[in-house]
Amino acid sequence: MTVCVERLGEEHPWCDRAQVAMLLVFLAVWGLDSWYGFTACGFLCPWMLRAAAGLALVGFGGYLVEEAHGLVIDAEPAGLVDWGVYALVRHPLYLGMLLVYLGLTVATLSAASMALWPAFFYAYDGFAAYEERRLVEALGGDYLGYMGRVRRWVPS
């Protein structure tokens, strides 16, 4: 999200509960699959390569979450935040969470966890679309201009 939510715009009503539920489901599936190896395909790639790629994704995802959260919380006065990580993508916090999930999945090559990822992306994309409609209502042309300059998920 690109504005201070508490003062401007609106989160999807299910956003917080859904994110907690997704986290719990992911950790259960990933943990069980990684521990018991039901669908983990770690044998396909050396563990050091998987660990390095997974750590890079988790680290960058965590960075996006931390930076995005800080910029929105510290925004004074309330308004469009279009600098920092928000100049890269419109929803860096959501993208960061998706990258954390992907990084953990890559580290173990868990097919079961990877099967969850498209559903999680679909949910986050829905949250983003809902919030963007509210932000267009609140900010009008400023937010429409931002949408024209910065993509939702992939840096330009």
Image (cartoon, helix red, strand yellow):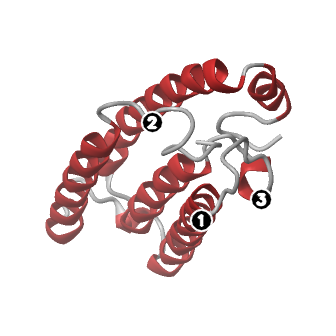
Distance Cα–Cα, label 3 vs label 1: 10 Å
Residue pointed to by mark 2: 124
Q: CA distance from mark 3 to mark 2?
A: 21 Å
Question: Residue 70 bears which disc, if any?
Answer: 1
Quarter where residue 141 is shown: top right
Amino acid identity at mark 3: Gly
Q: x, y percentage for residue 97?
A: 46, 54
Which residue occupies the foreground of this view, 101 or 22?
22
Q: Are marks 3 and 2 in contact (CB under 8 Å)?
A: no
Callout 1: few (<14), some (14-19), or many (20+) C-alpha neighbours within 10 Å? few
* Numbered tag placed on residue 40 in the rendering: none
Q: Residue at x 48, y 50 (%)?
A: 98
Which of the image's four quarters has the N terminus? Answer: top right
Task: Give the residue number, with chain letter if any, for mark 3.
Answer: 84
- Helix, strand or loop under label 2: helix
Callout 2 amino acid: Tyr
- Figure check: 34 above or below 153: below
